[in-house]
Image (tube, helix red, strand yellow):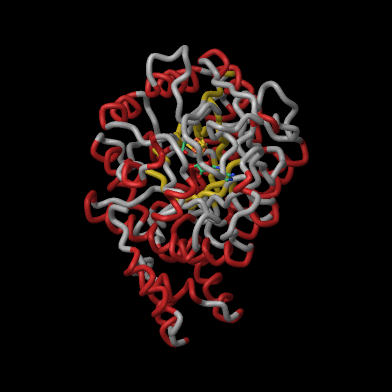
């Protein structure tokens, strides 16, 4: 597979088994300088299984997260627009040969209806997700995506609009990526699934996704087309997690070399049970909860400037723990079926159309209340994207940790707007109390700035940011 040196990864993993405790201490010291870790250093941390060393790794990850991102946690929801797909990925319910699910591609009017429902709940950030197939009513696959993006941005409920649309979709040509950029896409997200070539070829049975090099080249094509904001990930459970984590780093190193920027986000999906996809139930390499905690903490330390995303694939308990270990963005109240928001009661999603089973069924309001309770600031901020702080500009702010001030202020403002407009009474009460506590820790200048924003919000202004 292009960019991936399998022999080097296996050798590095083997060497890492012999890491001395002093070496681990030195690596953990280095992480406090917020520098990227090398493959060997990352492998050494992944090899750790002594509870005392793991405790130190977790503590270091929590420090790094706090240093770069502060206490804020960004919230978003996926919007599945289509479950029709020409590929056959053994682990996914949308695979072409699965007869157990009902197929549906939402048209722009149906997409608008879903988004209006989401806006009424308080959502502001959407991740558009789709299978790889052009619906009969669309001119081309990319036209389908761009028309969906237009429909999402056009939806409005009172003063509320979606601030940012990211997309998780199949690789596109450079010309098609340019169309996505023109349509106002935020992050282009694509998971390599596994970097282990033999496993990749085994699990991707037919369709364009069978070619691993085409998939790995997608990010270069997106960068070349001017999309400077990408999200990466491994689907954990397909292959050896240590191998895949090091391979992800090799891929990132290559991107940094080619384009001087790495991913804006790394996602850490684990394979969940998927109806009609037997492989999702009989995974040979399922990742345990203990190993999963380690993966998140080590990635946090290894690529400190990158946001880390966790979805509702994980249980509420696991999500709470992993936010402490370095997760900076979570999805909330997700439906993973096209049409799953407006046509069903929340918490009782259309299972029969779903890509996999979600494990966190809490409402957006419950998640916000829980974050507040744990001292995290829920955020709907999309300011970096709007102020064009993306690509190299974002990396320059994120790498030394200076993005934190802006993130924290924007989180406070967006939390205030959410509480005023959408929160249940108990969430409002706790949320306002929490904001008062946070205000007392602000500098005089920041407190004044925040008060000024509050006056604007009280006057009816929405969607304020710095
Ligand atoms: N079809 C496009 C693709 O495969 O790149 C984009 C959308 S696909 C629905 C989004 C991601 O869902 C995939 O990249 C894969 O990592 C993840 N996924 C598929 N089946 C899953 C399962 N059973 N459990 C958890 N995640 C899964
Ligand atoms: Fe299609 Fe993506 Fe599912 Fe594979 S993972 S079957 S490409 S939707």
Question: Eyeballing the image, is 93 above or below 403?
Answer: above
Q: Is residue 161 visible?
A: yes
Side (left or right) of 391 relative to 199 = left
Q: Quadrant of the C terminus?
A: top left
Closer to the camera in the image, 373 or 352: 352
Question: Eyeballing the image, is 133 above or below 405?
Answer: above
Residue that appears at 53% across and 26% down: 84
Question: Eyeballing the image, is 461 above or below 23?
Answer: above
Q: Quadrant of residue 362?
A: top right
Residue that appears at 47% across and 34% down: 87
Count of picture labels: 0
Q: Position of residue 33 (x, y in %)?
A: 37, 70
Q: Quadrant of residue 246?
A: bottom left
Side (left or right) of 105 relative to 185 = right
Q: Quadrant of residue 56?
A: bottom right
Closer to the camera in the image, 154 or 223: 223
Q: Is residue 435 visible?
A: no
Q: Position of residue 59 (x, y in %)?
A: 55, 71
Residue that appears at 38% across and 66% down: 34
């Amino acid at each position: 597979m292009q960019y991936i040196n399998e022999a080097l990864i296996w050798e590095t993993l083997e060497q890492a088994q012999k890491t001395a405790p002093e070496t681990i201490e030195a690596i953990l010291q280095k992480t406090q300088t917020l520098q990227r870790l090398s493959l060997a250093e990352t492998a050494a941390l992944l090899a750790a299984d002594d509870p005392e060393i793991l405790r130190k790794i977790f503590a270091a990850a929590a420090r790094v997260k706090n240093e770069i991102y502060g206490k804020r946690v960004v919230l978003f929801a996926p919007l599945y627009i289509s479950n029709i797909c020409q590929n056959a990925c053994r682990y996914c319910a949308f695979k072409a040969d699965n007869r157990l699910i009902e197929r549906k591609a939402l048209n722009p009017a149906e997409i608008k209806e879903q988004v209006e429902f989401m806006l009424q709940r308080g959502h502001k950030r959407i991740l558009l997700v789709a299978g790889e197939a052009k619906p009969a009513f669309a001119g081309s696959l990319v036209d389908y995506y761009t028309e969906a993006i237009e429909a999402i941005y056009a939806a409005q409920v009172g003063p509320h609009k979606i601030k940012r649309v990211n997309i998780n979709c199949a690789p596109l040509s450079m010309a098609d990526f340019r169309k996505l950029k023109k349509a106002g896409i935020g992050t282009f997200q694509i998971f390599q699934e596994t970097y282990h070539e033999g496993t990749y070829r085994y699990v991707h049975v037919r369709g364009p996704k069978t070619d691993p090099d085409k998939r790995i080249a997608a990010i270069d094509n997106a960068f070349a087309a001017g999309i400077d904001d990408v999200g990466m990930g491994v689907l954990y459970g397909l292959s050896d997690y240590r191998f895949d984590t090091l391979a992800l780093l090799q891929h990132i190193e290559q991107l940094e070399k080619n384009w001087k920027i790495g991913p804006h986000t790394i996602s850490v999906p684990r394979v969940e049970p998927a109806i009609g996809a037997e492989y999702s139930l009989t995974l040979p390499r399922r990742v345990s909860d203990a190993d999963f905690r380690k993966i998140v903490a080590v990635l946090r330390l290894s690529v400190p400037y990158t946001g880390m995303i966790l979805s509702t694939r994980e249980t509420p308990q696991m999500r709470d723990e992993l936010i402490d270990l370095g997760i900076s963005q979570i999805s909330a109240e997700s439906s993973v079926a096209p049409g799953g928001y407006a046509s069903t009661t929340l918490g009782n999603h259309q299972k029969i159309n779903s890509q996999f089973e979600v494990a966190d069924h809490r409402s957006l309001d419950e998640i916000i209340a829980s974050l507040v309770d744990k001292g995290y600031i829920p955020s709907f901020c999309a300011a970096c994207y709007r102020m064009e702080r993306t690509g190299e500009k974002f990396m320059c702010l994120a790498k030394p940790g200076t993005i934190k001030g802006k993130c924290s202020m924007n989180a406070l403002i967006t939390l205030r707007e959410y509480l005023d407009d959408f929160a249940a009474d108990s969430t409002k009460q706790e949320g306002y109390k929490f904001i008062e506590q946070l205000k007392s820790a602000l500098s005089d200048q920041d407190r004044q700035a925040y008060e000024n924003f509050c006056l604007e919000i009280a006057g009816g202004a929405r969607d304020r940011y710095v």
